[in-house]
Amino acid sequence: MGLLERVRAIIRANISDILNRAEDPEKALDQMIADMNENLVKARQAAALAIAAQSRLQAQYEQRIQAAEEWQRRAAAAVDRGDDDAARDALRRKLQYQREAKQLHESLQAQSAHLEDLRSNVEQLEARIQETILRRNQLVARYRTAEASQKLAQELARTGTLGATMEQLESKAIDAEAQAAAYHELSRDSLEERFAQLEEGTSVEDELAALKQQRLLGQGRSEG
């Protein structure tokens, strides 16, 4: 594929389709930009060569035109001298230069069209490179934003899980505290009950001793 065909293919290429087919769009765009710049350098070099060739053709064309005019003057001078043979030779040379000038003019027109095509493609390629660089930067910015959002979402999810775990631990702690309080309350009730039983036992013994004393006193009076 020639240079112009490659440049035209790049200009006509659908960047979105290329990105959709690429496994790594960022690398695909970077490679595309590198290829574009390489072809741009070659296209500019080709344009420079075309300009130089056009300048050479233009100089040759102008030289043939001047030569034809010069031989026309010589033919006229030979006619004025009555030298028809010299006039014929001069006219033959004039016609030869005119033919060459015509051929060079046709080459100039073709070269001008080729150069204009080159210039147009260079301008379009430059614009396409800028467009691709813009797309690449936008893509990278979107990728970086998406990547940051993903990390943030993962962090929030992790934090959410940690929060749930903390809630579970807190619930367990509350349950443990409630159980401890219950055990403490039960233990305290048991101890108080034991003391109450002891106190009650003491009162019963006192009552029994008093009752025995009363009975003894009562029996003593009866005997007397």
Image (cartoon, rainbow, N blue to C red):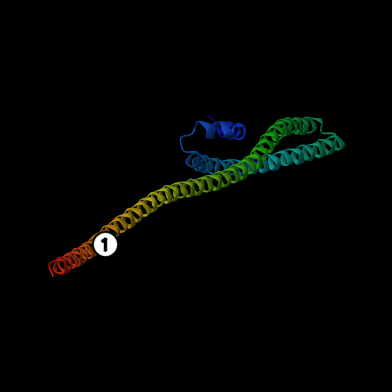
In the picture provided, is 199 more to the left or to the right than 97?
left
Q: Residue at x 57, y 42 (%)?
A: 40
Q: Position of residue 66 (x, y in %)?
A: 76, 41
Q: Quadrant of residue 178?
A: bottom left
How crowded pointer 1 is (Cα within 10 Å; few <14, some 14-19, many 20+) is rated as: few
Of 113 and 74, the residue lying toward us:
113
The image shows residue 102, relative to residue 197, as above or below, that is above
According to the picture, the residue beneath numbered tag 1 turns out to be: 196
Q: Quadrant of the C terminus?
A: bottom left
| Furthest-left residue in this view | 223
In the picture provided, is 48 more to the left or to the right than 153?
right
In the picture provided, is 82 more to the left or to the right than 48?
right
Q: Position of residue 145 (x, y in %)?
A: 53, 48
Q: Residue at x 62, y 43 (%)?
A: 131
Q: How many marks?
A: 1
The image shows residue 178, relative to residue 213, as above or below, that is above
Give the residue type at disc 1: Ala
Of 85 and 174, the residue lying toward us:
174
| Furthest-front residue in this view | 224
Q: Secondary structure at mark 1?
A: helix
Q: Residue at x 46, y 35 (%)?
A: 23
Of 120 and 208, the residue lying toward us:
208
| Furthest-right residue in this view | 80
In the picture provided, is 216 more to the left or to the right than 81?
left
Of 123 and 30, the residue lying toward us:
30
Q: Residue at x 56, y 33 (%)?
A: 6
Q: Position of residue 8 (x, y in %)?
A: 61, 32
Q: Quadrant of residue 220?
A: bottom left
Q: Position of residue 39 (x, y in %)?
A: 55, 40
